[in-house]
Image (cartoon, grey):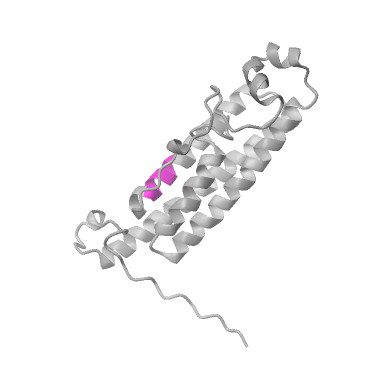
Amino acid sequence: MVFGGPNGELGASMRYLNQRYTMPLRELQGLLTDIGTEEMSHMEIVSAVIYQLTKGLTPEQLEAQGFADYFVDHTAGIYPVSASGVPFTAATFQSTGDAITDLNEDLAAEQKARTTYDNILRLADDPDVRDVIRFLREREIVHYQRFGEGLRLIQEQLAKYARDPSNPYATNTSFDPMPQRPQPRSRTR
């Protein structure tokens, strides 16, 4: 399930909103905040779809679809679990405090989410569900592109300020701070 599984929206939002605190550039902090917040809206979308698909089902219908165990614990409530029934856990996402490591984790997470949506599209036949999944899949691709831009930005900055400019990857931004790029001043009266 794209809500609570290891590649789901809940883990993505928690990953990005936690990583932003140690990201050394304000632009990247903003990027993680924006995408983390958007992932929370994806949770709402997925929850609404699940609710609409299960609203009004009888216990017999839920059992026939293989959801008897879920029904016993949650009735028709929305609960973050993977497609195999494993409850959400924070152990499914990573936040290391190292900008390069975290951004590569984020790139991989977006590709895994895209793959999950691709797999759902292969199984879903309801046109309304397919439209929502296509939209969410497109957003994961945009997130991947934005994280790629963020990785290039941090690599450029590390090349300028790293202790060893010939190997910026030897820098851990949590321990080897780099100066913030100047931000434009706002013109307020």
In this view, which residue lies farthest toward the front?
Answer: 73
The image shows residue 54 at horizontal and vertical percentages of: 74, 25
- In the rendered image, residue 2, in percent from the top left (x then y), is placed at 57, 33
Tell whether position 75 is magenta.
Answer: no
The image shows residue 187, relative to residue 80, as above or below, that is below
Q: Nearer the viewer, residue 126 or 35?
A: 35
- Image coordinates for residue 29, horizontal then vertical, percent: 47, 60
Q: Is residue 136 left or right of residue 141?
A: right
Above-or-below relation of 128 to 99: above
Single out the residue that lies furthest toward the right.
Answer: 56
Is residue 144 shown to the viewer in this render? no
Count of marks overlaid on the render: 0
The residue positioned 55% from the left and 40% from the top of the image is: 10
Residue found at x 61% / y 40% = 136
Q: On the rendered image, what quadrant is the C terminus found in? A: bottom right
Overall secondary structure of the magenta section: helix
Residue placed at 68% from the left, 20% from the top? Answer: 71
Range of residues picked out in magenta: 102-108
Q: Tell me the quarter of the image containing the N terminus.
A: top right
Whether residue 148 appears in this view of the structure is yes
Q: Residue furthest bottom?
A: 189
Is residue 45 shown left or right of residue 179?
right
User: As drawn, is 15 to the left or to the right of 56?
Assistant: left
What residue lies at 39% left-to-right and 58% top-to-bottom?
22
Quadrant of the image occupied by residue 78: top right
